[in-house]
Image (cartoon, grey):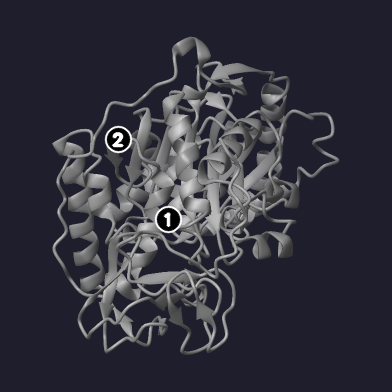
Amino acid sequence: MARPKRSNNLTIRLNASDNVVVARVELRAGTEIPEEGVTCRSHITAGHKIATSAIGPGAPVRKYGQIIGFATRDISPGEHVHTHNLGTGDFERDYAIGLEARATDYVEEGSRATFQGIVRPDGRIATRNYIGVLSTVNCSTSVARYIADSFGDKELADFPDVDGVVALCHGSGCAIAASGEAFELLQRTFAGYARNPNFAGVLIIGLGCEVNQMDSLLKNGGLEEGPLLQTMTIQDIGGTSATIREGVSRIREMLLEAHGVERRPVPVSHLILGLECGGSDAYSGITANPALGAAVDLLVRHGGTAALSETPEIYGAEHLLTRRAANREVGEKVIALIRWWKDYTLRNGGEMDNNPSPGNKAGGLTTILEKSLGAAAKGGTTNLVDVYRFAQPITENGLVFMDTPGYDPVSVTGMVAGGANIICFTTGRGSVFGCKPVPAIKLATNTALYQRMQGDMDINCGTIADGDTTVEEMGGQIFRFILETASGKKTKSESLGIGDNEFVPWHIGAVL
């Protein structure tokens, strides 16, 4: 593939039918844009939109060849297009379920990629080797942390192939109904983490009187106690100090079991890649997200699985997924999720366009429709083969979707509970994120961010906008980095030790 020439254009045009372009660099009022034949009427920040033709009130504004909103007043050529003159509105989208579904061009079995994975005795494949301390309720979080904190570098020196002991704590587990959607979701999340292959062993700690009772958690989650899955409650053990002593003793025993693992070549079909974007900017949908989508296409062609998520952030782009649905049932599931979220936000006094965040808007994103079109690019171009509820076990190979909120820690928590053993996280504003026990690869959308935050960012996708690489070339780089990371290479977030506090189960319903 020929390397692209560095662009001298001042703007980026994403589709011939668009009536806006994106400023590649900061532009002053009066700057002429030769490639579009317009002159900037005001200062335009890099990443923000410029009208290339007159747009009347109520007329659609198009980017990516899709509607991203409607003009709220007359917009002149060369004018800045943003929150002051662009709003959202309902319009018909042709879901055309399965219309663009195509047979996947799989790589031949003998030529498919492998990585150096950890094979558990039951056949599950891990990319990391942690021991987890899970608290069933907020009331047992301190004890869980005290136990995990007892195992620092000195205590783990004799167990070099164990990545660490991590406490996963949260603020729920009680004062909720003991049945129903919220309760089932919480327990499904716990069971999913306990089963995640990146945990060699798990100690679950409860208080004893909480709603999220240990017995029901084990039963409803299909979990069985054993040497590497143990439970204890503070009230039964005899208080905080006694529980910490007992917990430390049990973790020491688990370390002996977890120690001695070896990595060996395993097929990429054992990878479940969680896809996330946070702190997005206008470049997210131009560089990092489509490049990640290209990597996803490679992963799927080699037999792997990738999970798209963040249902509120595909709103306005859901028709692009339904058109690639492998069958009608999958397409209808996507549509049903959008309807549920519309009702959910309405009954809570919000609306779907409460998103983007202030940081997203400062980066050039104006509406949820615009943000969603860029976010959906992470899913690549292959068929959507299944749709899962939050924290539901992912069982299909290929591109799948999981219903999650757009809030990054909650979204990733759902995918890890579903079995994701590696994460790719794109960011344009500079999110710092990790998610033990799963490695998170950080993809910067622009070169300025990468240079400013090299200690946090793993890959610079800004070279696409710079004209130094193509989306396809960057997709290949990301795919290779995924394999290296799955084989044990540490990400920047892991080197910084980030990931102990990002376990955030999705809380829905009333707190009683």
**Percent position (x, y) of residue 393?**
37, 35
Q: Which quarter of the figure has residue 182?
A: bottom left
Q: Residue at image x 20%, y 45%?
A: 333
Q: Residue at image x 44%, y 62%?
A: 407
**Percent position (x, y) of residue 195?**
47, 32
Q: Which residue bears the numbered disc 1?
A: 173
Apparent side of residue 391 relative to residue 69 in the rendered image (left or right): right
Q: Which mark is residue 109?
A: none
Q: Residue at image x 60%, y 64%?
A: 8
Q: Which residue bears the numbered disc 2?
A: 383
Q: Quadrant of the C terminus?
A: bottom left
User: What residue type is disc 1 on?
Assistant: Gly
**Residue closest to the far top:** 110
Q: Quadrant of the N terminus?
A: top right
Q: Residues within 10 Å of mark 2 (few under 14, many from 20)?
A: many
Q: Which quarter of the figure has residue 3?
A: top right
* Picture layout, residue 262 above or below residue 482: above
User: What residue type is disc 2 on?
Assistant: Asn
| Mark 2 residue element | loop
| Mark 1 residue element | loop
**Percent position (x, y) of residue 52?**
37, 76
**Percent position (x, y) of residue 201?**
59, 31
Q: Nearer the viewer, residue 342 or 347?
A: 342
Q: Nearer the viewer, residue 1 or 151?
A: 1
